[in-house]
Image (cartoon, rainbow, N blue to C red):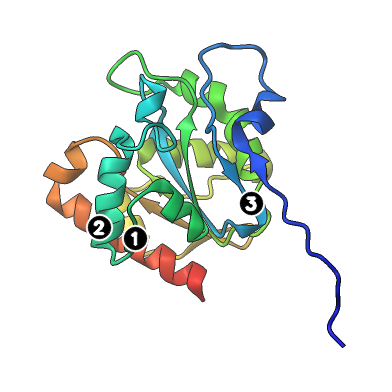
Amino acid sequence: MKSSRTIKVRIMNIQKELEHFSTGKTDLRFNNVEVIPEAIRAIMINEVVPSHSEDDFYGKQDAAYMSTTIQLFRKAGIEVDSVQDILNKGIYITNAVKIPKTEYAVSKESIEESLPYLERELALFPNVKVIMLMGDVAKKAFNLISKKATKKNAVPSISTYKLRNTEISYNSIRILPSYIMTGQNILIEKTKFEMASEDISLMYQLIMK
């Protein structure tokens, strides 16, 4: 006899969830997207939110951040047309720094200011198997989180190129350091584009096991 028990699906709005913990700073940007937390198997952490929220991953349909992201996924052999397609595959994308940068480089202060929100955000997803660190800012932010918990960096402080051949785990989650996934530079730097797409392909293989 089949069970008639109904499985309740929990849907969460990430922006609303993180706003509960915000201190009232008006320039903090959180992802205004609804997800099923238990369905997420991989998280990709990008560098920093854009100056205009409509250009972010969950912004307008042709958002700037998605233009390069979709190309990377397709190069990895994963057919997607939108961020919703990526979510449907169990992959959530976010930014390490929740405040738009005002200078060319992302300051350590802005990374630290956003860190409590990134930490809470990552904790929302109980079934994550892989975390991708897309660029040095993401790597620095994640190391600050791991250092707070374990007193040491999760990711060695060596070049991403060398780290790609190293199997790194943190709390049974596979960590994949890669390259920044937004901005037109990734399209110009063909080698980094190739490597980032290879890393995305590996991530997808790991979560599909």
Q: Which residue is mark 2?
A: 195
Marks 1,2: beta carbons within 8 A: yes
Tag 2: amino acid: Met
Among the two numbered marks 3 and 1 on one chain, the one whose residue lies closer to the N terminus: 3
Along the polypeptide, which appears first: circle 3 or circle 2?
A: 3
Q: Residues within 10 Å of mark 2 (few under 14, many from 20)?
A: some
> Residue 199, which numbered label?
1
Residue type indicated by callout 3: Ile
- Residue in view at x 45 percent, y 37 percent: 140
- Mark number, residue 36: 3
131 or 76, which lies in front?
76
Q: Is residue 21 left or right of residue 167?
A: right
Q: Percent x, y for residue 122?
A: 61, 44
The answer to whether residue 142 shows anywhere in this view is yes
- Which residue is rendered at x = 41% and y = 47% of the image? 83
Calculate the distance from the C-alpha at mark 3 to the C-alpha at mark 1. Answer: 24 Å
Q: Position of residue 187 (x, y in %)?
A: 16, 45
In the figure, is residue 99 to the left or right of 20?
A: left
> Which quarter of the rendering shows the N terminus?
bottom right
